[in-house]
Image (cartoon, rainbow, N blue to C red):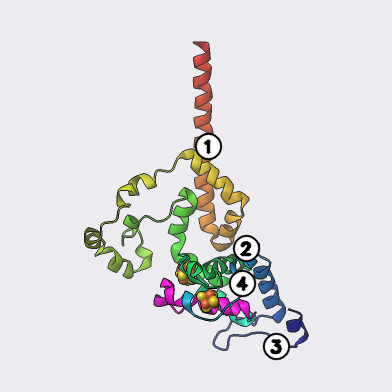
Amino acid sequence: MTAHATIPLPPIADPVSDAAPISREKLEEIFEDIRSHPTYDHEIHGCLNCGICTATCPSAHYYDYSPREIVQLLWTENLEGIYDAMQEKIWACAQCYTCAARCPFENSPGGLVMILREVAIQHDFDSVKEVLRPFSRVLLKVVSTGNQLAPNMITKEAFPDWGPNVAKVDAPLAILRKAIPMPTMHTLDTAWEVNLRTSVELYTIWEATGVLDQLEKVDENLFDVVSDVMEEKREEWEEWLEEQDDDDDEDDDD
Ligand code: SF4
Ligand code: SF4
């Protein structure tokens, strides 16, 4: 980092965008937040540039995205490249961690992407809001129930804002599932009935770990909705506890 500080370089600007240029100090601040993340040293140990991670990465097959590139940018401390990748590319990772299982250096590109996402939110990147906006309903489900999106929810009725492409996914699903039976489909209904106590404990975890603060930065409206859901569930939980106390008192009287 000292090497960067001694070289007087101009601010970084995107030649095809009206966005204000970003100063070298800001780039260094962002990289420092990445490098000082508690898991950073655990996720990166070097890089051969061999490309095994990219060859096995499902997202690399469909998007302009490469875990090898992400690791190389970080390993070589390419601050401009890191900043650029944080605008969009980091959101293409599916967090499957195939890369981590294959890397001969025991790097975890997927884990590094998680760090980059956290820092992008922390630094209030506009791109975060743009990229995550279509997923607000998924976020609502995940944060309010602790469950991920169930396969049977991906329908054009549930996601009209995803445009016509969701119909392409939705249409052949029933046929595909008959052809390739999914052993977990029978658990879908029960997966959405989350125990009240579990929900209330989850909300405490979201608060204590800063997840809700991040959500507020990314989508204030969604944060308000989630806060209302949390308040409602907490009241239900308190009422249930009071009912138990009343029942215990009645048993004692008997
Ligand atoms: S992160 Fe690992 S698998 Fe990927 S290019 Fe570097 S050394 Fe190879
Ligand atoms: S965790 Fe991300 S980068 Fe790694 S293989 Fe999966 S999609 Fe690719």
Check disc 3 and report its element: helix, strand or loop: loop
Specify whether residue 88 is in view: no
Which structural element holds mark 2? loop
What's drawn in magenta, residue-wise? 54-77
Q: Is residue 23 visible?
A: yes
SS at mark 4 in the image: loop
Task: Report the Cα–Cα distance between label 3 and label 1.
Answer: 55 Å
The residue that mark 2 highlights is 39
Q: Nearer the viewer, mark 2 or mark 4?
A: 4
**Mark toward the start of the polypeptide (3 vs 2):** 3
* Residue where numbered disc 1 is placed: 235
Where does the image place residue 148, in percent across and percent down from the top left? 43, 55
**Tag 1 or tag 3, which sits nearer the N-term?**
3
Front-lying residue, 16 or 144: 144
For ligand 2, tell me if the residue under mark 2 lies within 8 Å: no
Mark 4 or mark 3: whose residue is earlier in sequence: 3
Mark number displayed over residue 45? 4
